[in-house]
């Protein structure tokens, strides 16, 4: 898979791309991630990429020319162009799995007051990571990329993915490690007896219990 991220602040991605699982996936050739500063594509001699909104109002609006030119320079028939915007569909694990099956994603990070409306015409999907406002789309692009990359074959053990939160609309079961007794808090006996059938039954029961208590909305979706 290839992911291209369009931003005005490429330095924000240095740590994200050079650490932990994401870095290892890149080094193994499981994913290619490139950061593009769309300021490099502006026709303005002063590097300007935004201007005041027609009709008045606060803030500055990103102009279409630099973004169109940047996207058109990297887009292929396999590309899915995703605008990161508060008005998009809310990102979740189902969307992550869907996007992880694509060959090429182009993630467009906004900033300032927003995008010129005409930029939407070159985008295929519109995604939000939640009902709140951030200073730009850089953090959402990292969240989405992280969630997608970890689903790619070879990045994380398949067994680990199958038991994660939101698989089958359930939260993950509680896990423990050594010591067995820490300050009077003991590991459940069922996890110590080696009976894998009972362990699996216990874990499923705990998943259902936790989901009902903490995220009953997921149980409703599962019923539907």
Image (cartoon, helix red, strand yellow):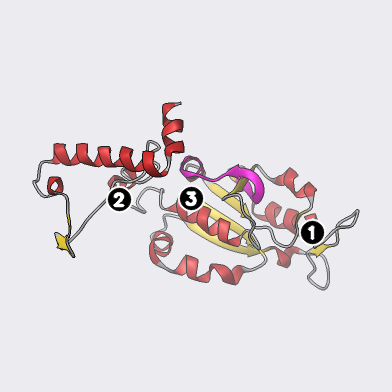
Nearer to us in this view, 199 or 119: 199
Secondary structure beneath label 1 = strand
Magenta: main secondary structure equals: strand
Secondary structure beneath label 3 = loop
Numbered range of the magenta stretch: 80-95
Residue at screen point 45% across, 69% down: 18
- Does residue 47 appear left or right of residue 96 in this picture? right
* Label 3, label 1: how far apart the Cα atoms are: 31 Å
Dot 3 corresponds to which residue? 1
Number of residues whose C-alpha sits closer than 10 Å to that of mark 3, classed few (under 14), some (14–19) or many (20 or more): some
Secondary structure beneath label 2 = loop
Residue at screen point 54% across, 46% down: 91
Residue at screen point 81% across, 65% down: 43
Q: Nearer the viewer, mark 3 or mark 1?
A: 1
Residue 76 visible from this viewpoint: no
Q: How many marks?
A: 3
* Label 2, label 1: how far apart the Cα atoms are: 43 Å
Dot 1 corresponds to which residue? 61
Dot 2 corresponds to which residue? 157
Disc 2 or 1, which lies upstream in sequence?
1
């Amino acid at each position: 898979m290839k992911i291209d991220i369009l931003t005005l602040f490429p330095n924000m991605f240095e740590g994200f791309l050079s650490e932990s699982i994401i870095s290892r996936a890149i080094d193994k050739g499981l994913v290619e991630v490139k950061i593009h500063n769309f300021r490099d594509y502006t026709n303005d001699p002063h590097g300007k990429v935004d201007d005041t909104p027609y009709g008045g109002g606060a803030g500055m609006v990103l102009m279409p020319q630099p973004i169109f030119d940047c996207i058109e320079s990297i887009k292929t028939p396999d590309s899915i162009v995703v605008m990161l915007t508060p008005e998009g569909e809310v990102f979740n694990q189902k969307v992550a799995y869907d996007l992880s099956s694509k060959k090429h994603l182009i993630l467009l990070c906004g900033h300032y007051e927003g995008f010129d409306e005409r930029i939407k015409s070159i985008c295929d999907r519109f995604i939000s990571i939640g009902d709140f406002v951030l200073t730009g789309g850089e953090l959402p692009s990292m969240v989405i990329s992280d969630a997608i990359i970890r689903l790619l074959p070879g990045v994380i053990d398949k067994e680990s993915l199958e038991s994660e939160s939101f698989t089958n609309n359930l939260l993950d079961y509680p896990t423990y490690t050594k010591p067995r007794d820490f300050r009077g808090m003991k590991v459940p006996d069922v996890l110590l007896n080696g009976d894998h059938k009972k362990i699996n039954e216990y874990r499923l029961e705990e998943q259902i219990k936790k989901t009902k208590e903490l995220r009953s909305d997921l149980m409703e979706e599962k019923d539907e």
